[in-house]
Image (cartoon, coloured by chain):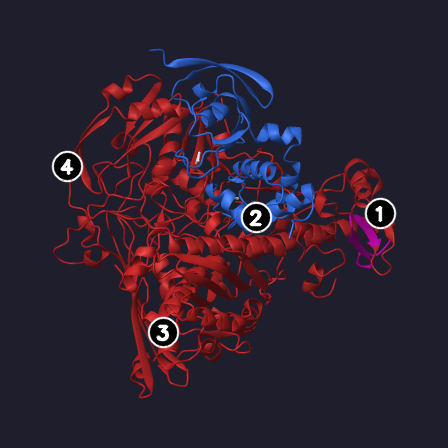
Chain colours: A blue, B red
Amino acid sequence: MDRFVAIRLTVNGEPVEARVDARLHLVDFLREQLDLTGSHVGCEHGVCGACTIRVNGEIVRGCLMLAAQCDGAEVWTIEGLTETGEIAALQEAFVARNALQCGFCTPGMLVAAAELLRREPRPSRERIRDWLGGNYCRCTGYHAIVDAVEQAAAALHGAPAE
Amino acid sequence: MTGSPLSEIDRPNSYIGRSVPRPNARRLVAGRGAYVDDLRLPRMAHVAFLRSPHAHARILAIHAEEARRAPGVIRVVTGRELAAHCTPWVGVLHHLKGLKSAPQHAMAVDRACWQGEPVCAVVARSRAEAEDAAALIRVDWEELPAVTDMETALDPATPVIHPDLGDNLAFRREHVGGDPDAAFADPEAVVVEATFHTGRHTGVCLEGRSILADWNPAEERLTVYQSTQAPHMMQTVFARHLGLREGQVRVVCKDVGGSYGIKVHVYPDEVATAALSKMLGRPVKFVADRIEGMVSDIHARDHRLRARAAVRRDGTLLAMEVDDLTGIGPYSVYPRTSAVEGNQVVNLCGGPYVLKGYRAKTTVVFQNKTPTCQYRAVGHPIATAVTEGLVDLAAEAIGMDPAEIRRRNLIPDDAYPCTSLSGMRFEALSHHKCLARLLEMMDYERLRAEQAELRKHGIHRGIGLACFIELTNPSPFMYGIGGARISAMDGATVRLDPDGSLAVASGVTEQGQGTEAILAQIAATAVGVPVERVRVVTGDTEVTPYGGGTWASRGAGIGGEAMLQAGLALKEGILAVAGAMLQARPETLDIRGGVVVDRASGAERLPLEELGRVVYFRGDTLPRDLPRELVATRHWTPKEYPFCFTNGAQASYLEVDVETGFVRLLGHWCVEDCGTVINPMLVEEQIRGGVVQGIGGALFEHCVYSPEGQLLSGSLADYLVPMSGEMPDIHVGHVETPTRESALGAKGAGEAGTAGAPAAVQNAINDALRPFGARVLAQPFTPARILAALGRI
Ligand code: FES
Ligand code: FES
C-alpha cells in the first residue's frame, strides 16, 4: 500500500496540492509543509485545543485529523483569518484586555472564540467559559479571555441582552 | 539635579502605574510568534530520545543496528558515546550545608534512575523518522529495586540509589527561632496539630521544552535557540559541559510558550541536543512532546508535613512547628538544586505572624521518580497551606472567626523593619491593609450570612482565607554564594536613535508576563518619550547586557530598576547635548513626550529627532569637546536585603457537593502588595494566572506513580489541569508599599497568586465541611478524598 496520498485543498483561500504521508496530522502538515506556524501543538492527543483550526466551516483539532482526510477541504488557520479581518474584533479585544500572556494558546483560543461568536452573538460569561472549556491556557487563568470575548461580542453586536 | 529619584517616576507623562497594552501582543494574536519549534535552519536535523521505561534499571546492552539503518537516520548516539563529548554535573550549592547529589549525565550511561531518563538519541531528517528509528532500538535491561516511597527512603532496609553517597538523604535542615518549647508548654496554650500533603505536580507549559542548537564548526561557535528563562545561565552551562568558552556560545530566546519556573533548569535532553549538534556540525532540534514532558519536565511540591501550633484562648498565636519531608527524584537538579523548595518551607512557614517560638525541619530524600525542582512560587504554596491551615485549626479550636484570629496575629503594619523567627528580614509589609481590603472587596460579612442561610437548606459553602508572604528579587544570597553562576544582577541599555526613538535591551526575559511592556514603560518614563517609540530587545546573550533572566519575580524589581537607571543616565546625556545646542543650562531643561522642553514652563525647545540628526550627522556643528554619548548602560542588584518580600491575602468562596464530593468555585479574591505597580493590568493578570495555577495543584493536578515508579498520569487525559469552565472570576486589589532599596520601588508580582491560592481553597473546603466534622489536608482535594473525609466511601 502506498504510504503517500495526493490531496488538493484550499488553505486560507489559496489552492494547495500535496503528497502527504498517510499518518501526517493536519496540524503538522500546515506547520511543517506549508510553514503556517501560527497553529500550535500542545498535546497531540486532542485535549489542549492549541491546534484548533477551521475545516469546512467547522472547528477541528488539527492533531486529531489527518492531512490525508483533507482532500477537497477548505482550511482556515489563524494566518488566513487574520488577513481577511474576520477575527479583528476578537484580536483587538485580546490585545486591549491582555487576554494572552505567552500567546501559545491564543491562535487556537481565537479560532474557537470566533466560532462561538458566529453562532451566538451575545454569549454569557458562563457560556463563554463553557465553550472554551476545551482550550487549555496555563498563563491567564481564563478571566481575561472571558472578558475579551465579551468585549468583542459587545463591539460586534452591541451590549448583551439582559 | 532633579530632586529625589522617586520623583522621576511620578513626572509628567509618566507611564508608571498605567495599563499600557503590551507591544508584542499584536504579533502573537496574529499567529506570528517565533517559538523554537517555528524556527527552521538549513540542514536542520531532529532528535528523538529513547527513554528508560523503568524507574531504576541497569543498561546491559543497547542494540541499535536496525535503528541506524532506518530511513532518514543520521546518527544514533548512546549515553556512553555522548559522555565523551559532554561532562556530567552535580546539582549542589555550597551554602546549603550538607546537600549532596550524584554526577548526572546528559544521557544515562550505565543505569537509568527514573522512568523517562534519556538513554539513547536518534538524530534524523525528521522527528517522525527519528521516533520510528528509536522504536527499533532494543535495550537489555536489568531491573533494579525502585525507591519510590519517601517515607521509607531512609530506612536501613531501603536500597541506596547512589551507593557512593552512603544513603538516600540529599539534605536536611532544622531551624529554631525563639523558644518553641516554652510556647508549647504555656499553661494557657491550646495545641492543634495535623499532617498536610501537597501533591507532586508539574508545570505543563503549553509549549513543550524546546531547543534548536546550531554548532558552526567554521566559526567554532554554538548558537542555541532555546525556550528558556535564563539565557546567560544556559550560556555558561553549555560552555562548561561542552568544553567551550562562554564567548563561544550564544543563547537566543525568542517567544517562550509559558515557563513558570519549568524552563529555568538544566535538562539532560537539552544539553544532549547541543552536544549532538556539536558532534554532527549541523543544527539539531528537540521539542519535548507532552508525554515526554510529563516524565522529564521537573516536578515539584511532593511534600508531607507534620505540623502543630499553639494558641491561647484569647486568640494569641504562640508557636508553630513544622516537620517537612520531600522526595526529589534521583538527582538534585542542576544548578539551582532540589533542596531549595524544602529550604523555603523552613524559611517561610509562619511568616506573616508574630510568634514566640518556631521550629521547622526539612528532610530531602532521593527516590526513583522524575526529579523535582523550583516551580512557580517555590515552597510558598506549601508553607502557606500549612501555616494558614494551622491558623484555621487554631481558630476552630478556640471558636474564633478566621478573619479575627488573623487580625490579632498578623505582624502589625507599623512594626517594620523586622525579622521573622525563621530569620527572614522584612523591610516593609502591609498584612493588615491587605486583609482589610480583601474582606471589604469580598464583602466577608455578607458571604458569612449567605453561607449560614444556605446551610439551613443543605447547601454547603465555605470561605477560606490565606495571608502570605512572597520572596522576590533575590540577591547573590540565593544562588551566587553557593557557587552557581546565576546572576543576581541585571543590566539595561538605552540608546537614542537619530529619529528620536529608543532602542533598549535588558538581561531579563519575556515569557508572556509583559516584561518587555514594563521595560518600555520604564524607559519611556525615565527618558521622557512616548512609549510607542521604545523598542525592546531581550533574550539574546550576544546583544543584551548580562543578567540572570526572569525568575523569582525579579523582572520588574531588578531588570526594571536597571532600566530606570539607564534611562535616567541617557536623559542626562541628552540634556547635556541639548544644553549646548540651546545655550541653556541642562538642569533648566527636561524631556517630555519626545521633546526637550523648558523645565519650568514646559515650552517646547527641541524635538529629539532634531537632536539626533545633529549629533549623528552634523556633529561638526557642536562644540568640539562636548560629550555626545547617546547610549547608557546601568546595572542593578539588591544589596541591602538578601531578598525582597511582598505580601498579600487571598480568599476563596466555594460550594462542596457532599453527595459527589465535587467542589464548585464561586469566587476568588486576591489583594497583593508588590510595591510600585508599573502596569496594573499586567500585575492583575500575573495574579490571576498564578491563582489558577495554585488552584490546579489544590484541586486537580497530581503526578501519580505506581509502587514500581511508573508515572500513571502521563497524558492530559489523566493529569487534569484547570480549564475555563471550572475556574471562577478572580478579583484583584492592590496595596502599594514600594521598596526603598530601589528608586522604582517594584517588588515583583509573578508568584503571589500561586503562593496563596491552594491555602485559600483548602481552608474554604474545610470551612464547608466543618458541620460534618470532616477535613481534608492532602492535595489535590479530589472528590474521592472529600467523600472519604465525609465517611461516604
Ligand atoms: S495539540 Fe491538538 S488538542 Fe492539543
Ligand atoms: S497565554 Fe500562555 S498558554 Fe495561554
Q: Quadrant location of residue B167?
A: bottom left
Q: Look at mark 4 in the image and give the residue it sits on.
A: B142
Q: Earlier in the sequence, mark 1 or mark 3?
A: 3
Work out whether B316 lies above or below B193.
below
Q: Earlier in the sequence, mark 1 or mark 4?
A: 4
Give the Cα separation between the discs numbered 4 and 3.
Answer: 49 Å
Host chain of mark 4: B
Amino acid type indicated by mark 4:
Glu
Residue mark closest to the camera, 4 vs 3: 3
Q: Look at mark 3 in the image and give the residue it sits on.
A: B393
Checking the image for residue B294, the label placed there is none
Q: Confirm whether circles 4 and 3 share one chain.
A: yes
Q: Residues within 10 Å of mark 2 (few under 14, many from 20)?
A: many
Q: Look at mark 2 in the image and give the residue it sits on.
A: A146
Give the Cα separation between the discs numbered 2 and 1.
Answer: 46 Å
Q: Confirm whether circles 1 and 3 share one chain.
A: yes
Q: Confirm whether circles 2 and 1 share one chain.
A: no
Amino acid type indicated by mark 1:
Leu
The answer to whether residue B636 of the structure is visible from this angle is no
Q: Secondary structure at mark 4?
A: strand
Checking the image for residue B606, the label placed there is 1
Outermost top residue: A1
Residue A151 in picture, x, y percent from top left = 64, 47
Name the residue nearer the viewer: B258 or B119.
B258
